[in-house]
Image: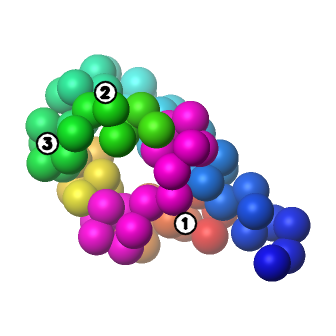
């Protein structure tokens, strides 16, 4: 696996956190909007879990974006 792909969970998580904070949302509020467990949102933000495509779309919708836009903002 190329090194840039190994950084994907961390880069994606940082992007989710930045967008969440910019939107004025807590992890709990984003989790509710995305229909996810707030602990899971925290795991993603810390780069401990890699989000599935479904989760990317759920998070994106919770942030008012498309899944593609969220990935683009994360650099992918």
Range covered by the magenta-colored residues: 44-57
Quadrant of residue 46 in the image? top right
- Residue 15, visible in the rendered structure: no
- Residue 65 is left or right of residue 34, and the answer is right
Residue at horizontal 86 percent and vertical 67 percent from the top: 3
Secondary structure at numbered mark 1: helix
Residue 56 falls within the magenta-colored stretch:
yes
Earlier sequence position, callout 3 versus callout 2: 2
Earlier sequence position, callout 3 versus callout 1: 3
Earlier sequence position, callout 2 versus callout 1: 2
Q: Which residue is mark 3?
A: 33
Q: Which residue is mark 2?
A: 27
Secondary structure at numbered mark 3: helix
Q: Which residue ends up furthest to the bottom in the rendered image?
A: 1
Residue at horizontal 39 percent and vertical 68 percent from the top: 52
Disc 2/disc 1 C-alpha distance (Å): 21 Å
Q: Which residue is mark 1?
A: 72
Disc 3/disc 1 C-alpha distance (Å): 21 Å
Query: Does residue 25 lie above or below 35 as drawn?
Result: above
């Amino acid at each position: 696996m190329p090194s840039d792909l190994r950084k994907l969970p961390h880069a994606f998580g940082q992007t989710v956190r930045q967008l969440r904070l910019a939107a004025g949302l807590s992890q709990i509020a984003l989790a509710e909007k995305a229909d996810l467990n707030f602990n899971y949102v925290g795991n993603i933000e810390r780069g401990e879990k890699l989000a599935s495509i479904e989760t990317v779309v759920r998070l994106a919708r919770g942030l008012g974006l498309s899944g593609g836009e969220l990935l683009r903002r994360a650099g992918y």
